[in-house]
Image (cartoon, rainbow, N blue to C red):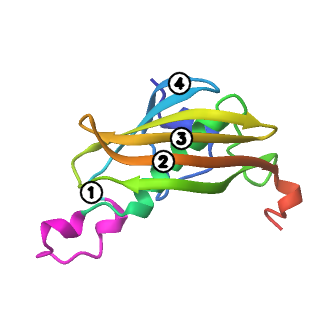
Amino acid sequence: MTGVDRIKALIPHRYPILLVDRVSEVDPGRTLVAHKAVTVAEPCYAHLPEDAPAQAYAYPVSLLLESWAQSAVILACWLKPNPDVLAGKVELAAGLRGAELLAPVYPGVVLEHRVQVLREVDEAAVVAGSTLVDGETVLRVAQFTVALRDSSVLGVGV
């Protein structure tokens, strides 16, 4: 099992947007299983009034996708980590296709992100996968492309 220390060595995300808690399985260049606990203490719930209905606590789809995508980036960068976006290679989301939300997610659950590499070309990886909660699929991603680009070419930090 891999904890936050290794995750932070692989990707530059930090609080409040680091949305992966641990990696339980990895076959570098092939597959990864990662987890994220959803809690009512998440910043996305801070604006809700005390009497908010239960459905108001549905975890935002954008954050669910971001958490899954961070898992994909962790897999893509497992053998070539770079937590410093001001130097070296920067991980870029180059495209997302076929994302399908199958059920809402609420505080108190643990997301299980599953990612598999479909193909790698140069410094890009095309991946697919899903997110499960208690064994039930809540999100499917048909295709997500992660590209690594030199930060100096992108003007990062300028």
Q: Are marks 1 and 4 in contact (CB under 8 Å)?
A: no
| Residue occupied by mark 3 | 128
- Asked whether, in this view, residue 134 is left or right of residue 128, the answer is left
In the image, which is nearer the foreground, mark 1 or mark 4?
1
Question: Earlier along the polypeptide chain: callout 1 or callout 2?
Answer: 1
Give the alpha-carbon distance from disc 2 to disc 3, as whole Å.
Answer: 5 Å
- Residue interval drawn in magenta: 42-57
| Residue 106 position by quadrant | bottom left
Mark drawn on residue 26: 4
* Picture coordinates of residue 13, whole percent (x, y): 57, 52
* Picture coordinates of residue 94, whole percent (x, y): 68, 55
Question: Earlier along the polypeptide chain: callout 3 or callout 4?
Answer: 4
- Residue at left offset 31%, top offset 52%: 102
Q: Secondary structure at mark 1?
A: loop
Give the alpha-carbon distance from disc 3 to disc 1, as whole Å.
Answer: 20 Å
| Residue occupied by mark 2 | 141
The amino acid type, in three-letter code, at marker 4 is Val
The amino acid type, in three-letter code, at marker 2 is Val
* Picture coordinates of residue 126, whole percent (x, y): 65, 42
- Residue at left offset 19%, top offset 78%: 49
* Picture coordinates of residue 86, whole percent (x, y): 78, 55
Question: Earlier along the polypeptide chain: callout 2 or callout 3?
Answer: 3
The amino acid type, in three-letter code, at marker 3 is Ala
| Residue occupied by mark 1 | 104
